[in-house]
Amino acid sequence: MAVKYHAKAGIIYMSTSGTTAASLVGGFRAYTLDGSQEKVDTTEFGATNRTSVQGFPAYAGTLTGFWASDDAIFRVASQSADGTNLYIYPSSNAPSKYVGGPAWVDMSLSGAVDAAVGTTAAFVAKGTWVNAL
């Protein structure tokens, strides 16, 4: 029977550039990952319905959490001219299960008078990703 895991043990690794090793990044508490594949229309004249072929996966998503003044990895990665290396592990209890690779990442902050300063990373693959889920 398959083992199920709680997301509380998820971990994120990120590098400060596309050529450096990824390190554990703190402060994130949630992620989304879209690995959908493009569908290319191949419908011909006279067809009775649309047809398509499957293209490449388009890994993209978000990481959300809380801003920490001493965690420079994410801030530096978001300004890197050659991107970052990003790895998402759904659970540290299943260390062989992850998805990731070279990525572009954008950083945004949010705040309110009744909330901690939040941060969001929007990412998209910039090279070949490993999907070992």
Image (cartoon, rainbow, N blue to C red):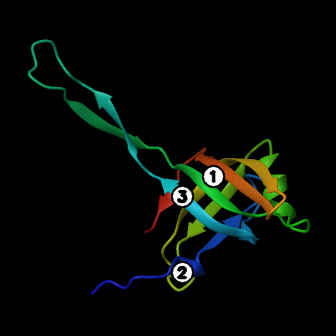
Check disc 3 and give the amino acid type: Thr
Secondary element under disc 1, as helix, strand or loop, is strand
Asked if 56 appears above or below 101 in the picture, the reply is above
Residue under circle 3? Answer: 32
Q: Residue at x 61, y 44 (%)?
A: 126
Q: From the viewer's perspective, tell me whether residue 111 is left or right of residue 18.
A: right
Sequence-first disc among 2 and 1: 2
Q: Is residue 123 above or below residue 86?
A: above
Q: Residue furthest right?
A: 69
- Name the front one of labels 3 and 2: 3
Residue 32 or 52: which is nearer the viewer?
32
| Residue at x 91%, y 68% (from the top left corner) | 70
Label 2 residue SS:
loop
Looking at the image, is mark 3 or mark 1 earlier in the sequence?
3
The residue identified by callout 2 is 95
What amino acid type should be assigned to the residue bearing mark 1? Answer: Pro
Q: Which residue is mark 1?
A: 102
Real-space CA distance between mark 2 and mark 1, rounded to the nearest whole angstrom = 19 Å
Residue visible at 70% across and 54% down in the picture: 120
Q: Distance of mark 3 from mark 1, alpha carbons?
A: 17 Å
Earlier in the chain: of badge 3 and badge 2, it is 3
As displayed, is residue 126 above or below residue 21? above
- Label 3 secondary element: strand
Q: Is residue 72 left or right of residue 129?
A: right
Viewer-side residue, 100 vs 3: 3
Amino acid tagged 2 = Pro
Q: Total label count?
A: 3
Q: Residue at x 65, y 48 (%)?
A: 122
- Tell me the distance, in whole angstroms, between the alpha carbons under discs 3 and 2: 19 Å
On the image, the x and y values in percent for residue 104 come to 67, 46
The residue carrying pointer 2 sits among few (fewer than 14), some (14 to 19) or many (20 or more) residues within 10 Å by Cα, namely few
